């Protein structure tokens, strides 16, 4: 077992700290942007008539910022921690790491300024970055591939990689391909319905081939480390990974069912999406069986609780997806708030809670402390975030059904808007809960980082 | 099994092979199926609208007659992002060049304002959408591939969420005047609407009236172009062709 000094030499603590901190800051910013946008739907938007704070532009910051500002920062930071630790090799280069860190923040900042102040946007959901920035992002992702590919490749020379390694290796190859495909092909090499097929593939592949594999990879690393025992079944790990790898890339077209895209592509997407739910269920069984016998840890260990809450939300989302991906469900719920609720449960409820849990596990260790500054803040943030996102999910799901059936009923359009308003008010309130949770979480982070005395583990019981 | 757990195997098989296979099914095959549908540039669209004398073309002429001062400013308006340059004063009247520029600039700001976050551009064959978004006898078709095969739908603007109505048949639904009022203050035409106002597409003219500015004219042209290819006079309006 390597000593603490060896581990410090293995992991570049500065890079982890910088990425995680920026990720948390962007999480709060995109949360605020989403809340601001929700105020427009409530009819109390405070900045009406100001061009650069127009709700439509703010909404693009909410989605693009969540992708590149929040998730990429958080995941990259956590990979800087996890990859060297489970492979036993350092990342390719620290200098490259700092260059990539600055480049990423610059890219996000340029996106924000271009969208808000210059109206330079791209009508690709999650890829709202102006098109001239996209090749730079692809280049960044190739650097990312080399940075984390190097330790993975070295470790792979010695023998089989651990599960996390498969997910991360595949993701490193997928992500540049996905960003290139989704942002540049529909603009320069294909138009119309063909472009629609690529675009829908991008919307889903950025989730399925970047966010999901990194997040599951990190889960496979952090959960056994925290519980100090191996995963329940290696066979299920293999099944989950290869199932996801084969079926997930084909999912995209389910975003545009009943569209002018040829039906065989739509059917293949429906089939592949239902197949993914089986792969996901095998992964979930593996994690739940790993928990067996250690479930009481959830009572004391907040990071672990974040991870399992997220895992359960993940399964709920995927179970829901297996149904609403069918053409029958799509007649009603497509274009409604149902989809928004689904997206928030997966992005905030699952991936948001996971990275928050992982960051809370890593953060005190980065500063040589045994525990977070305040148990109360830690618990309070967890409950606010968890209840907030669940409330938003149920609220928007119900709103979606109301809207969908109202549209089918051919009532005047404005009825569906008026019927939605109570749901939209409630959504804003859930948003306030989630934001309050995030602020408490961030305060705890700040206090942990700046606390002078070493926080000891005894505080945990207090 | 050990091989399946190596970096190079995962990267090649899962990373590249599976990705290409999925792309083949969900992108290359649909592209191949639709390869015979002609792809139109913005200039083609403008020429087509003029030769068929669609409602979009007459709306563009209307805007020129209503707001001549602003139309001049529109000709001078330069926009790098959509690649639209100045138009000489001699050519500054409704023609193929100005119409194409208006579509380009209008599309650019339609995207930049995130209109597509709340307004879809696709009529589906389900959920009574042809009844809701069509006007019997004027336009009652679902969306079909060829109407999207042009530069202004790359990437497509189908959208993923509807707070407001679908816009792909908008030319058949409201007239230019309605849109001028609606963009300036949506609640004036649609009480209860949650759409924000867009006053930066308007300015005061020499008489103190509030009128659309250069960008506003382009945006209005683009909106009135949506679905104009589907707008036909109702059956009962048609005259017998003279022999």
Image (cartoon, coloured by chain):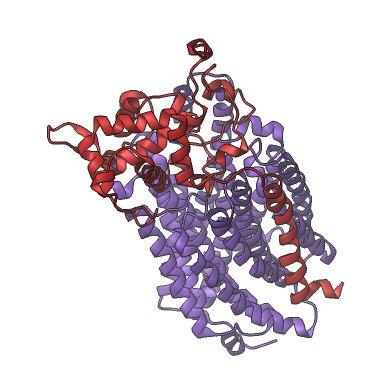
Chain colours: A purple, B red
Asked where in the image residue A28 lies, by quadrant, the reply is: bottom left
**Residue at screen point 72% across, 66% down:** B16
Left or right: residue A72 versus residue A256 is left
A131 lies above or below A273: below
| Residue, far left | B207
Relative depth, front residue between A379 and B232: B232
Asked where in the image residue A298 lies, by quadrant, the reply is: bottom right
B114 lies above or below B211: below
Q: Residue B93's spot in the image, x, y percent?
A: 29, 39
**Residue at screen point 32% across, 37% down:** B94
Q: Residue B43's spot in the image, x, y percent?
A: 45, 45
Relative depth, front residue between B93 and A279: B93
B238 lies above or below A299: above
Relative depth, front residue between B165 and A61: B165
**Residue at screen point 58% across, 65% down:** A358
Q: Residue A54's spot in the image, x, y percent?
A: 34, 45
Regarding residue A436, the answer to whether it shows in the image is no
Regarding residue A5, the answer to whether it shows in the image is yes
Q: Residue B235's spot in the image, x, y percent?
A: 53, 13
Left or right: residue A356 versus residue B81 is right
Q: How many numbered badges does the structure rendering display?
A: 0
Left or right: residue B129 versus residue B209 is right
Image quadrant occupied by the N terminus of chain A: bottom right
| Residue, far front | B243
Relative depth, front residue between A376 and A352: A352
């Amino acid at each position: 077992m390597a000593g603490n000094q060896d581990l410090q030499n293995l992991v570049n603590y500065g890079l982890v700290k910088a990425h995680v901190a920026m990720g948390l800051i962007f999480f709060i910013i995109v949360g605020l942007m989403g809340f601001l946008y929700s105020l427009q739907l409530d009819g109390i938007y405070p900045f009406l008539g100001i061009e650069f704070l127009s709700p439509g532009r703010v909404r693009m910051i909410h989605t693009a910022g969540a992708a590149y500002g929040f998730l990429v920062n958080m995941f990259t930071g956590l990979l800087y921690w996890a990859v060297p630790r489970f492979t036993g090799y350092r990342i390719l280069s620290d200098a490259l790491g700092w260059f990539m860190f600055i480049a990423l923040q610059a890219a996000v900042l340029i996106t924000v300024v271009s969208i808000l102040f210059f109206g330079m946007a791209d009508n690709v959901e999650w890829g709202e970055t102006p098109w001239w920035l996209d090749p730079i992002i692809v280049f960044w992702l190739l650097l990312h591939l080399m940075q984390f590919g190097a330790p993975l490749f070295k470790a792979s020379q010695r023998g089989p990689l651990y599960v996390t390694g498969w997910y991360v290796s595949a993701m490193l190859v997928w992500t540049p391909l996905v960003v290139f495909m989704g942002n540049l092909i529909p603009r320069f090499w294909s138009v119309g319905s063909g472009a629609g097929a690529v675009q829908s593939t991008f919307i889903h592949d950025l989730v399925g081939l970047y966010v999901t594999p990194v997040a599951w990879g990190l889960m496979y690393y952090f959960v056994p480390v925290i519980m100090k025992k191996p995963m329940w079944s290696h066979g299920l790990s293999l099944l989950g990974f290869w199932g996801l790898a084969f079926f997930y890339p084909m999912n995209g077209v389910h975003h545009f069912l009943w569209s002018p895209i040829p039906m065989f592509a739509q059917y293949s997407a429906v089939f592949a999406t239902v197949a993914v739910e089986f792969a996901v269920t095998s992964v979930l069984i593996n994690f739940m069986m790993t928990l067996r016998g250690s479930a009481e840890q959830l009572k004391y260990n907040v990071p672990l609780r974040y991870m399992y809450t997220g895992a359960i939300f993940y399964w709920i989302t995927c179970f829901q997806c297996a149904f609403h991906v069918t053409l029958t469900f799509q007649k009603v719920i497509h274009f409604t708030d149902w989809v928004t609720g689904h997206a928030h449960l997966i992005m905030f409820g699952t991936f948001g809670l996971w990275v928050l849990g992982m960051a809370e596990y890593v953060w005190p260790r980065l500063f040589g402390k045994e525990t977070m500054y305040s148990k109360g803040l830690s618990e309070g943030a967890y409950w606010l975030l968890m209840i907030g996102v669940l409330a938003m999910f149920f609220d928007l799901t119900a709103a979606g059904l109301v809207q969908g059936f109202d549209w089918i009923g051919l009532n005047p359009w404005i009825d569906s808007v008026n019927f939605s308003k109570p749901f939209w008010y409630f959504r804003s309130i859930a948003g306030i809960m989630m934001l309050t949770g995030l602020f408490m979480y961030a305060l705890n982070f700040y206090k942990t980082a700046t606390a002078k005395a070493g926080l000891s583990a005894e505080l945990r019981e207090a | 099994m050990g091989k399946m757990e190596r970096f190079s195997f995962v990267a090649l098989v899962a990373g590249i092979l599976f990705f290409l296979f999925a792309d083949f099914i969900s992108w290359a095959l649909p592209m191949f199926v639709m390869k015979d549908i002609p792809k139109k540039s913005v200039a083609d669209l403008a020429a087509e609208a003029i030769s068929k004398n669609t409602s979009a073309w007459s709306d563009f002429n209307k805007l020129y007659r209503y707001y001549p001062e602003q139309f001049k400013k529109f000709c001078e308006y330069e926009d790098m992002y959509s690649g639209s340059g100045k138009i000489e004063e001699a050519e500054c009247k409704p023609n193929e060049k100005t119409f194409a520029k208006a579509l380009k600039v209008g599309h650019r700001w339609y995207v930049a304002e995130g209109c597509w976050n709340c307004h879809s551009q696709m009529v589906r064959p389900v959920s009574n959408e042809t009844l809701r978004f069509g006007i019997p006898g004027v336009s009652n078709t679902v969306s079909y591939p060829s109407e999207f095969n042009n530069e202004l739908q790359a990437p497509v603007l189908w959208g993923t969420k509807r707070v407001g109505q679908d816009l792909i048949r908008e030319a058949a639904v409201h007239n230019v005047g309605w849109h001028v009022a609606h963009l300036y203050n949506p609640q004036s035409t649609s009480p209860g609407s949650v759409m924000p106002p867009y006053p930066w597409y308007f300015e005061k003219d020499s008489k103190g009236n509030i009128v659309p500015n250069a960008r506003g004219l382009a945006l209005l042209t683009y909106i009135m172009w949506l679905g104009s290819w589907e707008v036909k006079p109702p059956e009962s309006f048609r005259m017998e062709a003279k022999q």
